[in-house]
Amino acid sequence: MTPINLLAIADQLPRAWSSTIVGQAAGANVKVLRMDGAAYPDESHDFDEALLVLDGCMRLALQGQITEVQAGEVFIVPAGVPHAVAPGSDGTLVIIDR
C-alpha cells in the first residue's frame, strides 16, 4: 500500500466537478474532485455524505442558506437533505459516501 496524493489526482482530472473514486474504507467510497467556482446543482441521497474541503472553500447551499466550508473542515449532509454547491466554490473536495 502507498499513500494517495489527493491534490495531485484532483489536478489531473479532465474537468471540474468530475469526481473519481480513489478507494474505499469501511464500505464507503472515497472520492476527490476539483471545484472551479461554478455552481453544482441540487441533489439528495439516501445516505449521509461527508464533504471534506482539502483546499479552497466550498459554498454549500442547504435549506435556503449558504454555509462556507473552509479548507480542513468537513460537513456531513444527512440522508435525504437536498443540497447544492453555490457559485464561488473553488479548490479540492473529498466526498465520502456509499
Image (tube, rainbow, N blue to C red):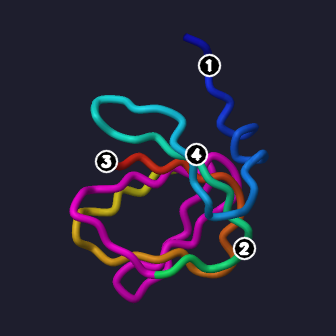
Q: Amino acid at mark 1?
A: Pro
The residue that disc 2 covers is 37
Q: Residue 69 or 51: which is nearer the viewer?
A: 51
Q: Which residue does the image show at 39% across and 52% down from the upper left? A: 50
As helix, strand or loop, the secondary structure at mark 1 comes to loop
Which labelled disc corresponds to residue 72?
4
- The residue lying at 56 percent from left, 76 percent from top is 40
Q: Which residue is mark 1?
A: 3
* Chain-order first, disc 1 or disc 4: 1
Q: Position of residue 11 (x, y in %)?
A: 77, 47
Q: Residue 98's mark?
A: 3
Callout in the foreground (4, 2) = 2
Rendered image quadrant of residue 16: bottom right
Label 4 crowd (10 A; few <14 / some 14-19 / many >=20): few
Return the x and y of residue 97 as percentages of the image width and height.
36, 49
How many numbered discs, if any?
A: 4
Give the side of residue 63 with respect to residue 79, left or right.
right
Q: Which residue type does callout 3 highlight?
A: Arg
Q: Nearer the viewer, residue 90 or 69?
A: 90
The amino acid type found where label 2 is placed reads Gly
In the image, the segment drawn in magenta is: 42-71
